[in-house]
Image (cartoon, grey):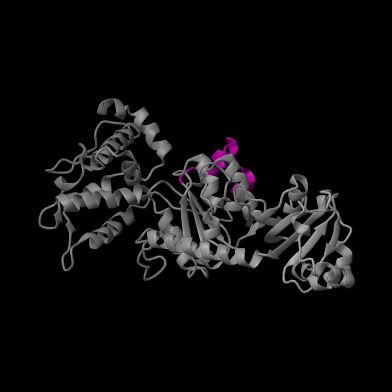
Amino acid sequence: MNEMWETNADFLPLAERWGVEVFLHIMDYVQNATMIIDPQGTIIYINEEYTKILGVSRDKALGVNLHRLEPESVALKVLEKRKEIIGAPDYLRSLGIHAIGKSIPLFDKEGTLLGVASVFNDMTKIIELSNELERTRAMNQYLVQQISPPLAHPFDDYICADREMRRILSMAAKAAKANCTILIQGESGVGKGVLAKAIHRASNRAERPLISINCAAIPENLLESELFGYEAGAFTGALRGGKLGKFELADKGTIFLDEIGDMSASAQAKLLRVLQERELERVGGVSSIPIDIRVIAATNQNLKDLVREGKFRQDLYYRLSVIPLTIPPLRERRDDILPQARYFLSKMAPPGQEITLSNMAIMALLKYDWPGNVRELQNVLEYAGVVCSNNIIEYKDLPATLRGESLPETEPSAGPGLDLKSAVALLEKDYIIEALRLADGNRSKAIQQLGISRKSFYDKLKRYQIEDEEE
């Protein structure tokens, strides 16, 4: 404890002649903020650099007790433990800055604690630059994973002849220019994600990122950290430096929250706060982070019903549905079936070639109810395009789910003697079995092909006893 008093013997007489004022004057030229507190935690000295870095005058700082001002400060921890702490990060909540330096206990020659001296620098700018670098790295990694060729026009992926669908696209184009939140509703496979991308590309945020997240595909206990990020040490297994959430990655751009109806109550509460305050807190964090984003949400569920059942917050529903857009299922816009089919076939055809549909194949496509909507149509055509001969898709080339007994290979006929509900259930069961077959039994791939949530998939396995049949 007496090492601090060891010095050159020739220096002591000079130091005594100079007096304390000379040393305090010297301290004002030290390029680090310096603070001394007494054994009770009261600030008894600050140097000139302290007033510059922290923007606090001497008369306001001196005499203030650190227990009241910064109860979690490193200096008070040193005071309590009577041991120095070097390089410990310190967040000064009262001033909103990050500091790092050295705090040491002060003892007299007899070992009595006199107080604590802290010498530190404001690291806020460095931390901000570090966070920006981390954001750039994370964004680069995300874009490398998600990159896709740009559209010639924001809404060109929507090939439609249906009047109602054209009205919805017209409204979406108008809403894209505003900065309001949009809620897209519709069955699985109707193209909610495609519409979200088109809206982003038509908006004034088109040059900034579009970050997509499927709320149903992420376990409930991980969803909050994926959305809002987390600080280092927030939970067991957390990355050493913490992690940026999807909302921070989407700053100045757009975030697309798919399957919003599957979000937990806790995540709903946090999302509501973000939409209201336009700021967030990371998991395990203590400071608020301002964000500037455009939110597009989508769901295949009826959110009004979920609100009535107490499964979805009413206040969040109204925050999300500023501009509601409902995409009709493909069975309600049959004028779109053939234009969509021709569009997909043009994408599938080898360069310089054309894939066409026979008359009976066209009739089958038009008769089918398409429970999987546009996504199912695309999958059916991809399957048929592989098995067909001479680039002509015949009726026999279509999957069994479309052929059934309603349209024999020789001539059209009436449908099977089933009521509509039973017929849809039979087709749904066959299509799930077919998806599992095409995915070689890989359920995750089958779920992706079907375009339904994991919960819905396993509910249908149980309802149709598909697992028992496989066994």
The part of the image, by quadrant, that contains residue 59 is bottom right
Q: How many labels does the image show?
A: 0
Which residue occupies the foreground of this view, 160 or 8?
8
Q: Where is residue 117 in the image (x, y as percent from the top left)?
A: 78, 58
Residue 44 visible from this viewpoint: yes
- Near-viewer residue (283 or 148): 283
Give the residue at x 42% y 55%. 193
At x 35% / y 33%, what residue is drawn? 421
Where's residue 446, x and y in %? 31, 42
In the rendered view, would you say 113 is above or below 57? above
Q: Quadrant of residue 434?
A: top left
Residue extent of the magenta highlight = 300-318
Examine the rendering and report whether any part of residue 168 can be seen.
Answer: no
From the top left corner, tell me how far across and down residue 305 is, in percent.
Answer: 55, 39
- Residue 170 is left or right of residue 120, and the answer is left
Q: Where is residue 141 in the image (x, y as percent from the top left)?
A: 42, 60
Q: Does the magenta stretch include residue 316?
A: yes
Give the side of residue 226 with respect to residue 333, left or right: right
State the residue lying farthest toward the front.
9
Q: In this view, does 457 lie to the left or right of 304?
A: left
Residue 40 painted magenta: no
- Left or right position of 54 against 150: right
Q: Note whether 65 is above or below 10 in the view shown.
A: above
